[in-house]
Amino acid sequence: MPTDTTALSRSARKKEAPPLDNYIGSKKPWLTGSRRRNLTGWVFLLPASLMIFVVSFIPMIQAFFLSLQTGRGSRLDWADPLWYNFERMLSDEIFKLTMFNTFLYLIIQVPIMLILAMVLANLLNNPKLKFKAFWRTAIFLPVAVSLVSYSLVFRTLFATDGFVNDMLTGIGVLQDPVNWLGQVDTARAVLILGLIWRWTGYNMVFYLAALQNVDYSSIEAARMDGANAWQVFWNVTVPQLKPMIVFTAILSTNGTLQLFDESWALTLGGPAYHTMSMSHYLYEVSFQKNPNFGYAAAISYVILILVAILALIQMKVGDKRD
């Protein structure tokens, strides 16, 4: 019986031809799942990034151009040479003194504060300690005290007729009252003491949080090997806190280099600029005693550079990854 070869060939081609949907979906869609997630993340980040750029980076650029100008108030002209304000700092004895004061606070206060915060965090992390919540709150409470309140309290305590002099003369340590805030060394000591009192609890909270991630089995193993409490703390606990130590060191260094509150409210920069910080001097140059915005902007850039350099050094020293 004869067959229709034309019909057979058509049916064979029909079976072999791929469906039309394959042609339509042959190209990979541009908006894949990973790209959609990345795009969503950038959409959420964009408003905050724009705000940071407008609020932070644009003023930084404006401050740089301002640092190249001289004059009083709003009557500013381009400096001749342009780096005149930065050159002026080399001969500014008050600026040199405020830089010395700031680095003195940094060298003395920051190590004492961080070590004390670490020791307190280790003690308060003991599961056998009673009233832990009370002690943690008591040590952290100075952070929540307003600057004005605590400055007034410290000024009253260390006044010539204040509680500290009364107590020390009463127990025979001092023969005559000391003018704590009127002498250079004692005024600096009071300011450092105030910084330690206020910010130790703040750093202690970071160490307490980091101690929750310390491998307790390593501590138990060290105790079983005969290590005492100090050896366990120094050789087992501290190495595991290293990332948090670097973090708090950078925060404390940046905060001290930008110190203003205590210098302004506690000692007013006295006596004779010997407790004034660089940021306090920047404020004085900007808004007091013949305001000079160009010179103040140059000082602010020096502070920024110092903060960046010290933060970079601390990160390089603290990062021992291979």
Image (cartoon, rainbow, N blue to C red):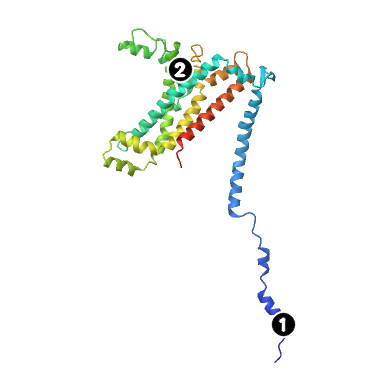
**Mark 1 element type:** helix
Q: Earlier in the sequence, mark 2 or mark 1?
A: 1
Q: Quadrant of residue 57?
A: top right
Q: Could you say where residue 260 lies in the image, as x and y percent from the top left?
A: 52, 21
Q: Residue furthest front?
A: 322
Question: Relative to 43, is 208 on the left or the right?
Answer: left
Placement of 226 over or under 139, stated as above or below: below
At 38% from the left and 32% from the top, the residue drawn is 118
Q: Residue furthest right?
A: 6
Q: Could you say where residue 211 lies in the image, as x and y percent from the top left?
A: 38, 38
Q: Residue furthest bottom?
A: 1
At 44% from the left and 36% from the top, the residue drawn is 244
Q: Residues within 10 Å of mark 1 (few under 14, many from 20)?
A: few
Q: Could you say where residue 103 lies in the image, as x and y percent from the top left?
A: 48, 22
Which residue type does callout 2 highlight?
Leu
Question: Relative to 315, is 176 on the left or the right?
Answer: left
Placement of 226 over or under 106, stated as above or below: below
Query: Which residue does the numbered mark 1 point to in the structure image?
Result: 7
At 50% from the left and 21% from the top, the residue drawn is 261
CB within 8 Å, label 2 to label 1: no
Residue in front for this viewpoint, 250 or 164: 250
Residue in front for this viewpoint, 251 or 148: 251
Query: Which residue does the numbered mark 2 point to in the structure image?
Result: 152
Cα separation, mark 2 vs mark 1, equals 104 Å
